[in-house]
Amino acid sequence: MMQRTLIILKPDCLQRNLLGEIIKRFENKGLKIAGLKMGKISDEQIIEHYSQHKDKPFFGNLQKFMQSAPVIFIVLEGYEAVESIRVIVGPTLGRKADAGSIRGDYSMSQANNIVHASDSPENAEIEIKRFFQPHELFDYYKDDWRWVYHEDERPA
Ligand code: CMP
């Protein structure tokens, strides 16, 4: 199934000059960029986005970190993209993530782990709506999908 998912390139990604590197990995994989912008996350958005962590002791630090610099919001599209991107990103704790994953290759931290990726198709839909207006998302023909996918997998 074709899916869209929300990526946030976190402040450590920007500060460590890794934006191009990380976007390149998603491009290399064959994912389509449906939306991309830079911005600051508001207090309200942080509380909503990390609602499952709002009572945890690290919430204050998480909020401070996520608001310490602008972030890059990206909507990526692809066949079963949500799960595929979680594999590319790797688990939360960077220092134990597999080499080859983004966190495995670039993060030593549990907090500063470079990138956020939606964890389910349901959350992806909610998160995309949280950060993108409909007119900021683009439908277009991605030329290399003729080669990235078999014809059974890609949209007509
Ligand atoms: P992620 O797995 O994308 O979503 C939850 C985020 O909370 C996680 O990335 C980290 O950025 C942050 N986080 C998780 N555990 C901790 C922690 N112990 N201290 C600070 N931040 C954390």
Image: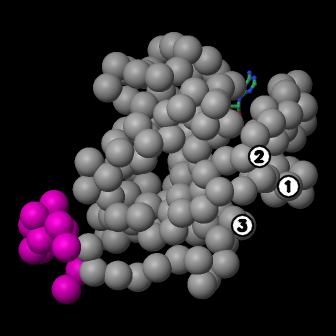
Alpha-carbon neighbours of circle 1 within 10 Å: few (<14), some, or many (≥20)? few
Q: Which mark is residue 147?
A: none
Ligand 1 lies in quarter: top right
The image's colouring method is: one colour
Tell me the SS state at disc 1.
Answer: loop
What crowding class fits label 3: few (fewer than 14 Cα within 10 Å), some (14-19), or many (20 or more)?
few
The residue at which mark 3 appears reads as 130
Circle nearer the N terminus (1, 2): 1
Magenta span of residues: 143-156
Q: Could you tell me residue 92's position as x and y percent?
A: 57, 28
Q: Amino acid at mark 3?
A: Arg
The answer to whether the beta carbon of the residue marked 2 is less than 8 Å from any atom of ligand 1 is yes
For mark 2, does the 10 Å Cα neighbourhood hold few (<14), some (14 to 19), or many (20 or more) residues?
few
- Name the mark nearer the viewer: 1 or 3: 1
Residue 113 visible? The answer is: no
Q: Which residue is mark 2?
A: 50
Q: Is residue 146 magenta?
A: yes
Q: Which callout, 1 or 2, points to the residue nearer the camera? A: 1
Question: What amino acid type is highlighted by mark number 2?
Answer: Tyr
Where residue 66 appears, as percent x and y from the top left, is 76, 39
Of labels 3 and 2, earlier in sequence is 2
* Occupied quadrant, residue 15: top right
Query: Is residue 18 found inside the magenta-colored segment of the image?
Result: no
Prevalent SS, magenta region? loop
Q: Residue at x 58, y 44 (%)?
A: 9
Residue beneath label 1, please?
A: 42
Classify mark 3 as within 8 Å of ligand 1 or not, answering yes or no.
no
Query: What's the CA distance linking mark 1 and mark 3?
Result: 11 Å
Nearer to us in this view, 128 or 10: 10
Identity, as a three-letter code, of the amino acid under mark 1 = Ser
